[in-house]
Image (spheres, rainbow, N blue to C red):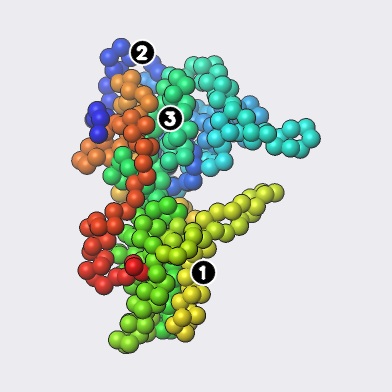
Amino acid sequence: MGARASTGEPKAGGAGAPASRRIAVNTGGGDAPGLNAVIRAVVLAASGRGWDVVGIENGYAGFLADAPGDIRPLTPAAVRGITHLGGTILGSTNRGNPMDWPCELPDGRIERRDRTGEILEAFERLGLDALVAIGGDGSLHIAADLAARGLPVVGVPKTIDNDLAATTLTFGFMTAVETATDAIGRLHSTAESHGRVFVVEVMGAGTGWIALFSGVAATADVILIPEIPYDIDRVCEKILERERSGKRFSMVCVAEGAVPIDGAITMKTVPAGRDRLRKIGGIGARVAQEIADRTGKETRSLVLGHLQRGGPPNAYDRLIALRFGAAAVQCVDDGQFGCMVALDPPHVRAVPLAEALSEIKAVPVDGDVVRTARALGTSFGD
């Protein structure tokens, strides 16, 4: 997976490295538990080398004079006590692509512009030597484009969806799984008490990692994921089979991007300021209604939504986030840019950004976790 990015003791500087460097760090895309831990690790690892760190607020907005964001120094004192905090002290956005930036014209119309040149100029003006970009697939594609234009970038993989192929795990994923597992477990008791079917919709627009892991851990009876198109009749067969065996309740865990064998992905409309956006979602309510119609069972649905992104990272995500942050600074020290740090147990290594973003990591339908679920009697609706 490329050259190893060691996370050992800090050193004064890599071969040919200047005595002092100034690093920028930003967070982009949807937030995830562990972002603050990465920021803290970057600051402390850089400070141990005598370097300065600045934080770019709201993705890349802090680089742009007319955008809502700023640039501020990040000292060890500024990141004290943030490892356990959810969210990000730098703010984030998933609508801030500098290559497709919305600019309002005097007549109120919106024009999309490429503002990469302004970012490169600001980077030079501020005397920065490297950018540590923390983000998921979309944010890291922006980082890769900036790297191709000459910006010295090191990426850190962040997504609760765990869908970046170059790394075994992304930080934030295990905390999201824990949150979903706890929610399904809590609903389990009320479903059993009232003889109901509960359908829990979790995040996962393109992949089913959260639904699979939390569904298995919480002993869901049915798990629906994008990688395995489902037949609603097979789902209902599983629920009625349980009913005939005296189990009057069932738990269904469905990824928001799950697709029926004869249909398309389910979309919903959400407000976004003055706009309304069409986004993936609504599958939980759809499946619940279809189950109720076909089985006659009282069926309820629950969308966990952003609960999966919020709250403190668990111990595993804190550890991975801290390792990633320290490894990113090591890459800067080594002059290794245009790369992303990745977990390749037992090591953290650096891989080219192009390789890291070459494909989405889908759930292997014949993998061990799916086989385990099937062996335990879980239905995937196929």
Query: Mark 1: few, some, or many residues within 10 Å (few <14, many ≥20)?
Result: some
Instruction: Tell me the distance, in whole angstroms, between the alpha carbons under discs 1 and 2.
Output: 57 Å
Q: Secondary structure at mark 3?
A: helix
Quadrant occupied by the C terminus: bottom left
Q: Secondary structure at mark 2?
A: loop
- Amino acid under label 2? Pro
Q: Label 2 belongs to which residue? A: 18
Residue 165 appears anywhere in the view: yes
Toward the right, the furthest residue is 107
Residue shown at the point (70%, 49%) measured from the top left? 274
Residue shown at the point (51%, 75%) measured from the top left? 289
Pinpoint residue 275: horizontal percent, then vertical percent. Answer: 67, 49
Q: Are marks 3 and 1 in contact (CB under 8 Å)?
A: no
In the drawing, what numbered circle is on residue 285? 1
Pinpoint residue 12: horizontal percent, then vertical percent. Answer: 29, 18
Q: Nearer the viewer, mark 1 or mark 2?
A: 1
Residue shown at the point (32%, 26%) measured from the top left? 331
